Amino acid sequence: MENDNRKYAVYSRKSKYTGKGESIGNQIELCKNYLITRYNANADDIIVYEDEGYTGANTKRPEFQKMIKDIRNKKIKTVICYRLDRISRNVLDFCNLKDELSDYNVAFISIREDFDTSTPMGSAMLLITSVFAQLERDTIAERIRDNMLELAKTGRWLGGNTPLGFKSEEVEKLTLDGKKRKLFKLSPVINEENTVKLIFEKFLELKSLTQLETYFIQHDIKTRNEIYFSRSTLKSILTNPVYAMADKDTLNYFTDKEAEIFQEENFNGKHGLMVYNKTIQKTGKSTKQRSVTDWIVAVGKHKGFISGNTWVQTQNLLDMNAERRYRKPGINTSLLSGVIYCNNCGSFMRPKLNSKIHEDGTRSFSYMCELKEKSRCKKCNSKNIMGIEFDKQMLEIVKTITSANGETYKKIKTMANGEFQSANINEDEMQTLQNTKKQNEKTIAKLIQKIALVDGDIVEELTEEIKRLKSANLEIEKSLSKLTDTKNNNQQQIEYAKLVLDIFDTYFQSFDKLDLVTKRSLIRLIIDTVEVDGENIYINLAGSDKNNPNQKILSLPELHSK
């Protein structure tokens, strides 16, 4: 790829710390030589990742994960290893990596197997490997589904976070060989059960998730964690089959949806539903709901408390609302969404578009308290702020802070030059401590030699002296450690200050020409939070101490909107 400034990644792994066989060093050298001879790479083009003492059975290896992070950050254009099993001995893990490399346009090379995805033959070989991996995936999926069918026979709760309205109750069951197995079922929590019933009742009455959210906020009805119900939480409850009775209505509903239904003869309204194989769960990633056709619907051991008719009506209404929903176009130009808080209730101030359109085509908006809007002013009635006017004032503050003539800029420049008090590490002091420690070690060695030659009376004195010197060295090591940490910390501060200066000089001097997303990101480097009360706006700059905040204050009256 032309003008591709990304690097080559050399990955090496060995399960044990040994000097035999394909050592880490040998793997790296072979990979480097391959890149130099085939791709004319030089040392500056190559990043080495080494995992020694880690198994290839999984990908939980520090350097491997670091390499993956660099790939996602678009720093790597090719990954090379000595042999395929250095990456992973698990075919499925390897093919997951291959898919990710493909997503980021990263080539893969394995010297021993002669895999090179930048060539047609290499790509074909990896394709064959993928076929076997897919076979393994399908076999695992079939095994999981068989297990799900076995679970459906029991109707038991598998564990995890219990739905609102239930708690998990442990029950024991004897197996054929007389051994006890722990099983779990759901049992009701009465006060929560009443809340769930109210959610279904009010949704069918109000016919809107937004209005349902407002109703619960206005009436101070909260979750078991004592926070207000959000629209997404309410929808999750309304769509959860666990609350529905296993009766004719739910049986017909899931039959029409072509779900796999188990124990149809038990859909008699005496128990609730239990659904298996409902979501796809991947490590480190959010869950994704499967199609209803993949669900396994069974009769649970718990009692359902929402009739099938009510539950089905709810699903139909949710589907109808989804079809009607109209989403406003994304024309929000606010710079500070996610930064401004209402000081009265602690909620975010969100941008709310107004009908007024300015001459330049931008649409007017106000920053409005989120709780105020959701509760229809019942729980908070803080005043709105004129968005465009406020953003302009914030931009002026940001420009002043980042100006080369400003105090903030000058302080950071002083830090970048290493001209601050904590940077004055006494190198002579460190050298003196190191020399004293070495001298003590030599003295200890001499005293140990003397012990073998002197009488017993003197041995005790020599032993005490050795203990004293060792104790002194421990104190010296502590002092050296503190001085070294301070020195490293100072160096980090210097590097950070240089980076901040570079950002100030590169971006903030031409801030008005930047796109909206970049402007928002840069503002968050300068401003931590903005708090609004009835009279003033308190701008907390990044890095402020809570006990001694670095604040700038604006007066509110001229920024109020209706």
Image: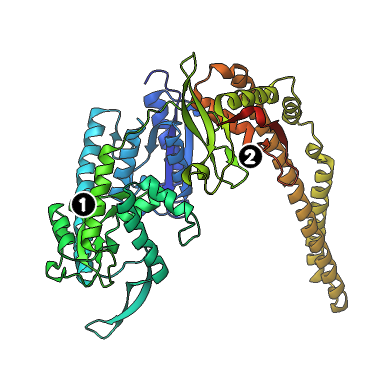
Give coordinates of residue 383: x percent, y percent.
Answer: 59, 37
The color scheme shown is rainbow
Residue found at x 47% / y 52%: 217
Residue found at x 34% / y 38%: 100
For residue 511, which quarter of the picture?
Answer: top right
Dot 1 surroundings within 10 Å: few (below 14), some, or many (20 or more)? some
Asked whether disc 2 touches disc 1, contact meaning CB atoms under 8 Å apart, the reply is no
Q: Dot 1 lies on which element?
A: helix
The quadrant the C terminus occupies is top right
Which of the two residues, 521 or 249, is positioned nearer the viewer here? 249
Amino acid on which the number 1 mark rests in the picture: Val
Q: Mark 1 points at which residue?
A: 292
* Relative to 421, 267 lies left or right: left
* Relative to 254, 332 lies left or right: right
Asked if one can make out residue 165 in the rendered structure from this viewpoint, the answer is: no
Residue found at x 81% / y 44%: 431
189 vs 63: above or below: below
159 vs 538: above or below: below
How far separated are the C-alphas under marks 2 and 1?
A: 45 Å
Give coordinates of residue 174: x percent, y percent.
Answer: 27, 83
The quadrant the N terminus occupies is top left
Asked if one can make out residue 181 in the rendered structure from this viewpoint, the answer is: yes
For residue 470, which quarter of the picture?
Answer: bottom right
Which of the two residues, 283 or 490, is positioned nearer the viewer here? 283
Give coordinates of residue 292: x percent, y percent.
Answer: 21, 52
Which mark is in front, 2 or 1? 2
Dot 2 surroundings within 10 Å: few (below 14), some, or many (20 or more)? many
Give coordinates of residue 395: x percent, y percent.
Answer: 62, 24
Q: Name the residue under label 2.
A: 531
Q: Which residue lies furthest to the bottom in this view?
A: 178
